[in-house]
Image (spheres, rainbow, N blue to C red):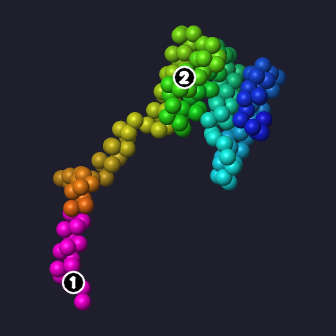
């Protein structure tokens, strides 16, 4: 299950999910993520999108097995695109991919897009938290300088230091 992008294994994974069991599916998803991290780290070619789709499908199948009240189509399709969207800012592309490939209607596509949006917003953020953290590091009364002002200030301080310590 960890060789290739995982597209060939998606059908059997979904169809045989009850026979495979939760533990096997979780292990397959984690092994796929570890294999992609190792291969990317060692410079092998290939991208993370399809292995992330496979890991998301594993998560969706497990979530349907653990909570059977969630329809399989919604659980699998939402998780299938939510995992890649956590790392790749392609919300509309991933939601469209799931909608077209899985032939979802409008009612089933809206939870998929919402899963993409929440996944990306949770992991990558909107920038609000970073702005708040950056603002809390400033001292009261300290104004944030734009890059041009910082450069001018640095040039002025360099010129001042040369006046005090002239070169021989």
Few, some or many residues within 10 Å of mark 1 (<14, 14–19, 20+):
few
Q: Position of residue 143 (x, y in %)?
A: 20, 52
Residue drawn at x 35%, y 46% as measured from the top left: 133
* Element at label 1: loop
Label 1 vs label 2: CA separation? 63 Å
In the rendered view, tell whether residue 166 sits above or below residue 5. below
In the rendered view, tell whether residue 72 sits above or below residue 54. above
Identify the mark nearer the N-term, 1 or 2: 2
The label number, if any, that marks residue 95 in the structure image: 2
Left or right of residue 110: residue 26:
right
* Element at label 2: helix
Q: Position of residue 116 (x, y in %)?
A: 52, 26
Majority secondary structure of the magenta segment? helix
Residue drawn at x 59%, y 32% as measured from the top left: 83
In the rendered view, tell whether residue 150 sits above or below residue 159. above
Quarter of the image where one finds residue 97: top right
- Residue at image mark 1: 165
Left or right of residue 105: residue 38:
right
Q: Is residue 94 visible?
A: yes
Q: Position of residue 105 (x, y in %)?
A: 57, 10
Q: Which residues are magenta?
A: 153-168
Residue drawn at x 67%, y 36% as measured from the top left: 51
């Amino acid at each position: 299950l960890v060789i290739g992008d995982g597209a060939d294994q998606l059908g059997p994974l979904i169809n045989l999910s009850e026979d495979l069991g939760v533990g096997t599916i979780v292990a397959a998803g984690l092994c796929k993520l570890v294999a992609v991290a190792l291969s990317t780290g060692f410079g092998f070619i290939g991208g993370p999108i399809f292995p992330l789709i496979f890991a998301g499908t594993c998560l969706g199948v497990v979530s349907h097995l653990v909570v059977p009240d969630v329809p399989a189509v919604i659980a699998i399709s939402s998780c299938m695109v939510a995992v890649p969207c956590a790392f790749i800012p392609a919300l509309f592309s991933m939601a469209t991919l799931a909608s077209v490939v899985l032939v979802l209607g409008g009612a089933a596509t809206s939870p998929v897009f919402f899963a993409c949006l929440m996944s990306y917003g949770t992991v990558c953020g909107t920038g609000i938290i970073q702005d708040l953290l950056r603002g809390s590091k400033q001292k009261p009364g300290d104004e944030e300088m734009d890059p041009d002002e910082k450069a001018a200030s640095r040039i002025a301080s360099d010129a001042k230091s040369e006046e005090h310590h002239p070169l021989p």
